[in-house]
Amino acid sequence: MVSLPRIKSTVVVREDGKLIKVVQQRGQLFICAHGCCCGKTERGVAPVPQDLYHREWERRTLRNRVHLTFSACLGPCSLANVALLLFDGRPTWFHSLHTTEQVLALYDYIEARLLSDLPLPLPESLQKYVFDGFALAEAHMPSLASANERLP
């Protein structure tokens, strides 16, 4: 097993004057699971595998490195089963994530990023699920620009 780099932290002075040690995480994974469409099988959308997301996050001991958040709507609802990975301050948006293979590929990518100081390309199996969720994302993420060039 490869050891991950040491966890960094900072000290913050809380409003009441108490010093609090805050872990500086590399990322956060947001999963739309409680919105109006994501995972709503009655609307014809595949279920969101929340248990798998959580189990893999725990199994891979990502706490204090990449936070996992199950949220309400991340939008856009027309895509459904949306996830947002913020990593080293950069967003990567995904849609239609619902299979075991997709979730495992996403976590494999996250683990690889944790071992690297440089951005890594997404695995080919996830590239077709990437979209621009923020304006001007292409200016900061060339990999998204090249993915969008393949769209019809």
Image (spheres, rainbow, N blue to C red):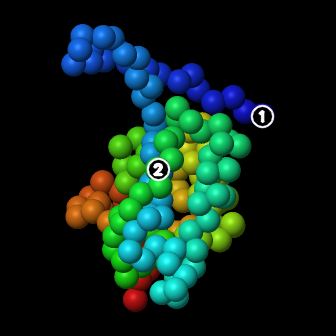
In the depicted view, which residue is nearer to us: 54 or 132?
54
Locate the C terminus by quadrant.
bottom left
Residue at left 30%, top 54%?
140
**Which of the marked residues, 2 or 1, is nearer the chain's N terminus?**
1
CA separation, marks 2 and 1?
A: 26 Å
User: Is residue 28 rendered to the left or right of residue 76?
Assistant: right
Callout in the foreground (2, 1):
2
User: Is residue 136 rendered to the left or right of residue 26?
Assistant: left
Which residue bears the numbered disc 1?
Answer: 1
* Residue extending furthest toward the right: 1
> Mark 2: which amino acid?
Thr
Element marked by disc 1: loop
Residue at left 78%, top 34%?
1
Which residue bears the numbered disc 2?
Answer: 69
Residue at left 37%, top 49%?
90
Residue 61 falls in which quadrant of the image? top right
Q: Counting other residues with Cα less than 10 Å from the Cα at mark 2, is it few (<14), some (14-19), or many (20 or more)?
A: some
In the depicted view, which residue is nearer to us: 141 or 100?
100
> Mark 1: which amino acid?
Met
- Does 29 sit above or below residue 58? below
